[in-house]
């Protein structure tokens, strides 16, 4: 059974545990099946790339690796703190809302 992932592409998150603890960034990609997200400038790895048509030089590429979704938390810029996203029904549609402030995400 697939778990629900409360984070979406474009959300501003902060890393709450691990090597990159305290870093902020936007979610570039979300993987609901594995429960992981890729956050910009977080969990950087070096990948060795063979020469190809798109990259004729080849070499070592620095890129982001996925982080488990439990290690990041939604960041609210207005309150300057972390908060959980909550789903509420407004005008017959489901809306993601910040738990602390009540602002729509």
Image (tube, rainbow, N blue to C red):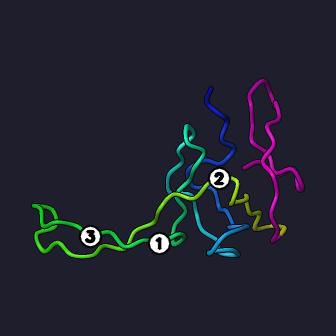
Q: Which mark is residue 69?
A: 2
The residue indicated by pointer 3 is 48
Q: Earlier in the sequence, mark 2 or mark 1?
A: 1
Element type at mark 1: strand
Query: In this rendering, is residue 81 above or below 104?
Result: below
Categorize mark 3 by other alpha carbons within 10 Å: few (<14), some (14-19), many (20+): few
Choose top left, top right, bottom left or bottom right for residue 39: bottom right
Whole-percent x and y of residue 62?
A: 37, 74
Mark 1 highlights which residue?
A: 44
Q: Residues within 10 Å of mark 1 (few under 14, many from 20)?
A: some
Which residue is painted at 80% across and 27% down in the image? Answer: 91
Q: Tell me the magenta residue range.
A: 80-105
Residue drawn at (21%, 75%) of the image: 59
- Magenta-span inclusion, residue 96: yes
Label 2: state its secondary structure: helix
Marks 3/1: CA–CA distance? 13 Å
Name the quarter where the N terminus is drawn: top right
């Amino acid at each position: 059974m697939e778990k629900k992932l409360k984070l979406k592409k474009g959300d501003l998150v902060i890393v709450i545990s691990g090597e990159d603890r305290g870093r902020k960034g936007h979610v570039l990609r979300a993987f609901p099946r594995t429960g992981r997200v890729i956050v910009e400038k977080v969990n950087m790895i070096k990948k060795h790339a063979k020469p190809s048509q798109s990259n004729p030089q080849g070499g070592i590429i620095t890129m982001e690796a996925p982080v488990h979704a439990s290690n990041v938390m939604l960041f609210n810029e207005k309150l300057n703190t972390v908060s959980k996203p909550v789903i509420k029904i407004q005008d017959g549609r489901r809306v993601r809302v910040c738990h602390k402030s009540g602002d729509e995400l």
